[in-house]
Image (cartoon, helix red, strand yellow):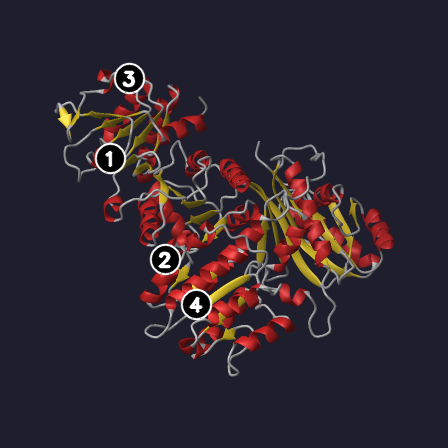
Amino acid sequence: MNSLDQLRRALDPRSIALIGASENPNKVGGRPLLYLRRWGYRGRIFPINPNRAEVQGVAAYPDLASLPEAPDLAIVMVAGDGAAQAVEACARRGVKLAICMASGFGETGAEGVKAERAMVAAARAHGMRLVGPNSQGLVNFGTGTVASFSTMFLEAPPEDGPVAIISQSGAMSAVPYGLLRARGIGVRHCHATGNDADVTVAELARAVIEDEGVRLMLLYLEAIPDAAMLADLARRAQEREVPIVALKTGRTAAGQRAAKSHTGALANEDRTVDAFFRQHGIWRARDMAGLVSAAEMYLKGWRPAGRRLVAISNSGASCVMAADLASELGLPLAVFAEATRRDLARVLPGFATTANPIDITAALLSNSRLFGAILPIVARDPAADLFLIAIPVAGQGYDVDAFARDTAEFAALTGKPVAVAAPQALVADRFRAAGIPTFSGETEAVLALDQLARHWALLRRPAPPKPPHLAVALPPGEGRFLNEAESLALIAAHGLPVVPHRLCRSEREARIAFRDLGSPVAVKACSADVPHKSELGLVALNLVSEEAVVQAFAAQLAKLEAIGAAPDGIIVAAMAEGRREFVLGARLDPVFGPVVMIGDGGKYVEALPDIELLLPPFSEAEARDAIGRLRIAPILEGVRGEPPVDVDALAHAAWRLGALVAAAKGRIASLDLNPVLVGSAGQGVVILDALVERAAP
């Protein structure tokens, strides 16, 4: 039985042992037994308590050895050293998976980490998998396997449904569960992995995604220790058309420190997480409310074809607010065809608007059929992708039931996403009863529509083409850095455009280089011992005579000698022209592998960073999209009569860089191309400097 099969068996076990079972259902040791009996677990239950003949009316056993069989699942509810001993006993007894609820391990520091690793090693030595420690438990309401002590299941009684929640944190599995249940949404899986010492959120989610009843997956992550498993989960979820929404905390340095103290997590650089999620079609929520806010939209099965919004309201103010928010989010308001406006004019009173947003005005009070008449008209318009219906005020005299019926019929007929904004509970309840996603205000409704449209656009992106097969040969040597000449030669060999230059080892060679390259030139010291030259005065620019070149050559050799750096020569390079400086770079992330950076360049690059990250393999189109997300993107299109910058050439260079670092197979730790000079459209790019860092053996 492989690991995923073990996990699936643990979510539908034939038998469960409860180590440390308590008679008191309000204690950690008593709650799982109460839940298993209350919510329909059909397998055998073995409470283990050496001091009782039965626990909560179920025959108890003194220890694991006394059980009539090796259980599929064991819940370890004892603390401290007893937990570690119980885990090892489970492994020896042949248990397939154990949940360790005890805390005081990897989240507490070095000694706790050591004890946690020993616990995992003991489990793995006998083929057992471990969830936790510091786990609140695993829950599958589809099978009645409620192996958890969460109080939330008493506060919000369960209902089996299409949502799976997998979380490192126990509380952050219970909170989205409670929010969903309050909205009448059923939840099937609600798992908390704790410290992720063995079974991680990604691995457990990979097992859960095979459940055909799951149609939406929500993840809470404090670290991503196994990016390959998370990528495989995303691939399988896309095959099943199950959207994944993830809340990954630790966005800031303070958050990363808190995550480490909470679960012993190792923080991932946040921009890299964004890039990874984008690459694999995972929507990243910013907070817990955002994790669940669009759940109803996903569960309707809508697949929006585009992002053009239609807003309809009986309030002009709601129309204005919807238009403002749509503009901020980049949701274009659909421009109706002339035929659509003509048909609307026949239905709406003369003082209502037939443009988008549609303000029905107070005429809705006297004619409750207006919604039913308007919706089929706008549905026929090819520019309409998403629909917002805002009813800020309604009540006595309004036929709200008719509004809800008409909206539900429209949604069923067209298959187009509809969100209702209705702050009045009476109005909202009618729409929810009709199966329409309903929100308290325009902001929440428009954000949910925007998320749905953006996420499905992300999921529909074509897979990037396979990168070209490259053989990357680093020059011999064991030094940490290649010198500049070696770095430029490496990237040039893989199709990246570098500035014309010569590596000179004598004044004569420097003179010849100047004559060949033409005036003006730059003169730069070349030494693997000095990766950053400008700060040491080892770069001279705009030299226009042989004598100036020779003087710079001698001065830079003297400086290298003075600082004890081995001279590899002096570079004489042409002075290139272009429109704007950019920076391209790559680094080897210990979790995600190669990561490519595209950013604005110049001397303020570190003080005012404006960068985007991509994970190879990616396409040139994805690189162009990344450039379009830079804050400077609007000026790259050309402003005040300037021609546009050659974004296509920059995107091509980024794609080439991604192919190179991927083909290096972990031998390049970082690669810095700065500055990258980009010309106007059609003029291309030229790389003026490069620095390659070898990965440690």
- Split into 4 quadrants, where in the image is the C terminus? top right
At mark 2, the secondary structure is: helix
The numbered mark, 3 or 1, whose residue comes first in the sequence reads: 1
Which numbered disc covers residue 442?
4
- According to the picture, the residue beneath numbered tag 1 turns out to be 32
The numbered mark, 1 or 4, whose residue comes first in the sequence reads: 1
Which numbered disc covers residue 69?
3
Q: Are marks 2 and 3 in contact (CB under 8 Å)?
A: no
Give the answer, above or below, for where 229 lies relative to 444.
Answer: above
Decide: few, some or many residues near mark 2? Use Cα within 10 Å; few <14, some 14-19, many ≥20. Answer: some
Decide: few, some or many residues near mark 3? Use Cα within 10 Å; few <14, some 14-19, many ≥20. Answer: few
* Mark closer to the observer (2, 3): 2
Give the answer, above or below, for where 326 lies relative to 218.
Answer: below
Which numbered disc covers residue 647?
none
- According to the picture, the residue beneath numbered tag 2 turns out to be 433
Please indicate whether residue 519 sits to the left or right of residue 621 in the image.
Answer: right
Give the image location of residue 313, x and y in percent. 46, 72
